[in-house]
């Protein structure tokens, strides 16, 4: 069994200065319609976990310069961030339109994303995608080589940069390199569908430490290495790969959330005003309970099955019509890929069908919104919802499942969670379900709505304790824990 890093690691494990490398940048510069350049901050678990560390420790963050004014404000590709109080350098890597199409929309999200979510029928491995992926990883390695000081650790993030560690290792043989893989890692029988599987493993094994959210993902990675490289020695007890006289430690290090920040935002949010904002005044009757889903419009998230499950529930339990409304907060993503555009259309059509079938003059079964919500409003929406439904087909972790119970500051809330999400491994108290079983999803939502008060309170308390134990402030320290490195 691959060991999970201790949650007791101290901040002293984090180096005084480091280099972070990711596809997405923490801050971008965008030119508005009025010609003014404005700074936008990225949202998400990676940024919320790493930006505070970089602000306190310093160093350089290397990322794709995706903002339309990014390079205009940078000097030799570098800008000081955060703009309000500069604390570290952001090195921007400019990518051509062809590179973005091939590396990002192509290989990363039409080969690696479906592969790692074990949905190989969606893989499309055009030769140009691989060529662009290799070329962009080379760009990132070159960019890191120009900014990293001797002795600075380099920490690569996620599936966009699987080749970059080896490319950098060739330039800097003595560098300390780490990687964190934020999405699931597939079983060997699935990974072998990838035409470049050995090259990807070879790139990653140039790292000293590779982190995954769960022990299961880490073990599957080790099995893939064992299948691909007969000369490699695998020690599953310590999570160590020895190959070509070099060692790589493979660890389970789950990323959590900033629990205190989520809790504070939920307390500050006015639940009534949040309901009005999201539902609209005519649909915000506080006597109608709320169930909630929050995710990107990605085919791995299981939204159509969830909507069909709701229809099944309202059909089987007509007494629940008008008793609760389901709010689907969705965010568009990767619209440069046809499968994502089709998925969004399918979701919208499904919502409309359910509303047409069950809706009345004074009750709308499903409220669907793609509105951009600030963090406080989102935390207030969590707080307002009595049931949260998180049913992805597969998910590396799913931080929404962590945020929801922490935001339930009034002591009321129930989480319906896919047993195939990484969060199911770490959160105690959720009502778990197979995300493909429409009938079971309906039954589990019904159960969540009708939990007895004592059971509901006990489950929420356990969920909150689980989420707080994985606070993101310790995630970085665990990855750099000296006792866990080769």
Image: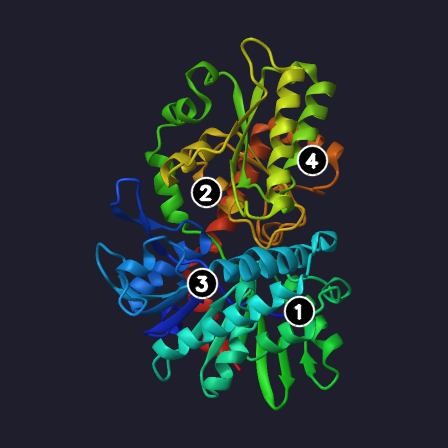
In front here: 129 or 192?
A: 129
SS type, badge 2: helix
* Residue in front for this viewpoint, 69 or 170: 69
Label 2 belongs to which residue?
Answer: 406
Give residue 248's position: percent from left, percent from top.
Answer: 58, 80
Q: CA distance from mark 1 to mark 4?
A: 29 Å
Residue 375 located left or right of residue 171: left
The mark that comes first in sequence, 1 or 2, is 1
Residue where numbered disc 4 is placed? 305
Disc nearest the viewer among 1 and 2: 1
**Sequence order check: which comes first, mark 1 or mark 4?**
1
Percent x, y of residue 293: 55, 35
Camera sees residue 208: no
Judge whether 453 appears above or below 48 on screen: above
Residue located at (65% from left, 41% from top): 302
Asked if the residue under mark 4 is in contact with the one under mark 1, i.e. CB atoms within 8 Å, the reply is no
Q: Secondary structure at mark 4?
A: helix
Crowd tier of the residue under label 4, counting other residues whose Cα lies within 10 Å: few below 14, some 14–19, many 20 or above: many
The residue that mark 1 highlights is 221
C-alpha gap between disc 2 and disc 3? 38 Å
* Disc on the earlier residue, 2 or 3: 3
Residue picked out by circle 3: 95
Within 10 Å of disc 3 (Cα), the crowding (few <14, some 14-19, many 20+) is some
In primary-sequence order, the first of circles 1 and 3 is 3
- Relative to 446, say whether 225 is above or below: below
Whole-angstrom CA distance, mark 1 to mark 2, is 31 Å
């Amino acid at each position: 069994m691959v060991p999970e890093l201790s949650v007791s690691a101290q901040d002293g494990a984090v180096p005084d200065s480091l280099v972070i490398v990711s596809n997405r940048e923490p801050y971008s510069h965008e030119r508005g319609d009025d010609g003014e350049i404005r700074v936008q901050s990225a949202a998400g678990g990676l940024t919320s976990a790493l930006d505070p560390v970089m602000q306190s420790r310093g160093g350089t963050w290397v990322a794709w310069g995706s903002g339309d004014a990014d390079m205009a404000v940078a000097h030799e590709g570098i800008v000081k961030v955060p703009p309000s109080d500069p604390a570290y350098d952001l090195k921007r890597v400019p990518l051509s339109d062809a590179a973005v199409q091939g590396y990002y929309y192509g290989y990363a999200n039409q080969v690696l994303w479906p592969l790692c979510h074990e949905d190989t029928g969606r893989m499309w491995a055009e030769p140009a995608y691989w060529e662009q992926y290799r070329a962009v990883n080379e760009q990132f390695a070159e960019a890191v080589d120009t900014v990293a000081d001797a002795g600075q650790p380099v920490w690569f993030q996620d599936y966009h940069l699987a080749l970059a560690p080896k490319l950098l290792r060739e330039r800097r043989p003595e560098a300390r390199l780490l990687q964190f893989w934020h999405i699931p890692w597939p079983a060997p029988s699935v990974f072998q569908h990838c035409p470049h599987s050995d090259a990807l493993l070879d790139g990653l094994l140039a790292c000293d430490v590779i982190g995954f959210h769960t022990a299961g993902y880490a073990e599957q990675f080790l099995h893939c290495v064992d299948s691909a490289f007969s000369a490699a020695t695998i020690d599953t007890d310590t999570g160590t790969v020895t190959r070509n006289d070099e060692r790589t430690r493979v660890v389970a290090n789950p990323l959590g959330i900033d629990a205190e920040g989520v809790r504070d935002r939920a307390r500050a949010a006015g639940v009534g005003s949040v309901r009005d904002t999201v539902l609209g005044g005519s649909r915000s009757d506080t006597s109608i309970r709320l169930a909630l889903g929050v995710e990107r419009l990605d085919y791995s998230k299981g939204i159509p099955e969830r909507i069909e499950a709701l229809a099944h529930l309202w059909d089987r339990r007509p007494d629940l019509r008008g008793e609760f409304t389901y709010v689907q907060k969705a965010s568009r993503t990767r619209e440069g890929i046809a499968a994502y555009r089709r998925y969004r259309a399918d979701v919208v059509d499904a919502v409309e069908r359910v509303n047409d079938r069950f809706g009345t003059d004074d009750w709308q079964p499903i409220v669907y919104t793609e509105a951009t919500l600030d963090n406080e409003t989102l935390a207030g929406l969590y707080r307002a919802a009595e049931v949260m439904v998180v049913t992805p087909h597969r998910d590396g972790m799913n931080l929404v499942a962590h945020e929801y119970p922490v935001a339930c500051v009034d002591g009321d809330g129930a989480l319906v969670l896919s047993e195939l999400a990484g969060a199911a491994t770490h959160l105690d108290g959720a009502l778990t379900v197979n995300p493909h079983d429409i009938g079971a999803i309906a039954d589990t939502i019904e159960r969540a709505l009708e939990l007895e008060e004592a059971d509901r309170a006990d489950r929420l308390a356990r969920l909150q304790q689980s989420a707080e134990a994985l606070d993101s402030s310790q995630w970085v320290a665990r990855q750099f824990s000296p006792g866990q490195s080769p």
